[in-house]
Amino acid sequence: MQQPPALGTLLAFWKPSSPPALGLVAFSEKILLVTLDKKRLKVGVLFGGRSGEHEVSLASAASVIRGLDPDKYEAVPIGITKEGHWLVGSSAQKLLPEVLRTGQRVTMTADPTDAALMRLDGSGGGQRLDVVFPVMHGTFGEDGTIQGLLDLAGLPFVGAGVLGSAIAMDKDVAKRLLQAAKIPVVPWIAVLRADWERNPNDIQQAIEKKFEYPVFVKPAALGSSVGMTKVHTREELAPALNLAAEFAMKILVERAVVAREIEVSVLGNHDPKASIPGEIVPHREFYDYAAKYLEEGTQLLIPAKLKPAQLK
Ligand SMILES: Nc1ncnc2c1ncn2[C@@H]1O[C@H](COP(=O)(O)OP(=O)(O)OP(=O)(O)O)[C@@H](O)[C@H]1O
Ligand SMILES: [Mg+2]
């Protein structure tokens, strides 16, 4: 990627005797622009997208933009419609849905030497970004695909890379790897949609051989509790598998555990740091879509009440 010169490099040329403003003008116009732009990092906030979690992404993007210090960052909201059109518009966070309706069509080129976003109106204009913050959930957002495009475009981005994203998106693959690393996971069976459609009786038998009800049935590659059912009886099993099958080619069936739900974020690569744990206390039977996004009532306790040993 073409990196703009770091401010430090520019300052190294600085002649202390000359007044600062003139010192900058002495550089070529291009470098001057880069320097001024550098004051605020241009953060492309990608939101929306083609997944079942499109709406959730709007709320997440609004809170990310709210959290960006305007002195340091210029947010460039980039909305992706449910059809997959990329649109840019005003940076006002309350206008996020407006970006999706009336924004200007752009695309991201995979050529790392080009401007990052190219307008599709024939003007050939582009918009440079310093970094991209993908705030998309689910397919085509969290699963490594966008991350691959950004890698090709040579644009740094926030969050996990291609491999980590793809692994974490597939709950079956993620659990296998966690198990291999000796991290305990809730027992599960992965069911291929094709097998369920071909041999429903065999699948039901295999599930009932391994688990007692209740079980959780969920699409392997989705989040936000979309397509998920807590199955209490045999009668509820087939509708639950059919629902999950609408969203994914692979379905997870898990033992229902009775447990507290503690969530922890981890940031960093070689020197990862864990956040303070939080506890989710849903007001519904489990932390389903309604409890997450539609209804008030779920308690989010930060920090979670844990003993020091548990915290560690
Ligand atoms: N095996 C289980 N036992 C008990 N509760 C479960 C189980 N699986 C899911 N749940 C409940 O459903 C909620 C959502 O499940 P899960 O976290 O697996 O999916 P998701 O939130 O849709 O996906 P992701 O966390 O990857 O976005 C959990 O927070 C929990 O309340
Ligand atoms: Mg979850």
Image: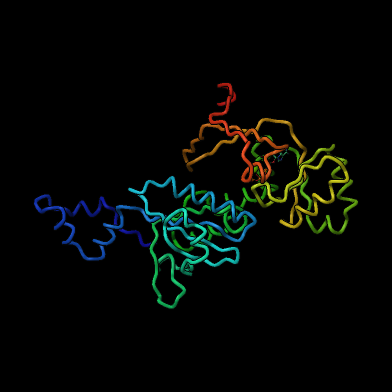
Number of marks in the rendered image: 0
Q: Quadrant of the N terminus?
A: bottom left
Residue sitting at x 56%, y 63% = 81
Q: Percent from the top left, x then y, of residue 37?
A: 30, 57
Q: Position of residue 252 (x, y in %)?
A: 75, 47
Depth check: 268 or 285 in front? Answer: 285
Q: Quadrant of ligand 1?
A: top right
Left or right: 166 as drawn, with respect to 246: left
**Residue 262 showing in the rendered view:** yes
Q: Is residue 182 above or below residue 116?
A: above
Q: Is residue 95 above or below residue 118?
A: above
Q: Say left or right for 162 vs 35.
A: right
Residue 7, horizontal then vertical, whole percent: 27, 52
Residue 293 lies, in percent from the top left, at 61, 45
Name the residue rendered at 39%, 65% in the picture.
127
Which residue is depicted at the point 44% across and 61% down?
154
Q: Which residue is rendered at x = 52% and y = 59% of the image?
A: 97
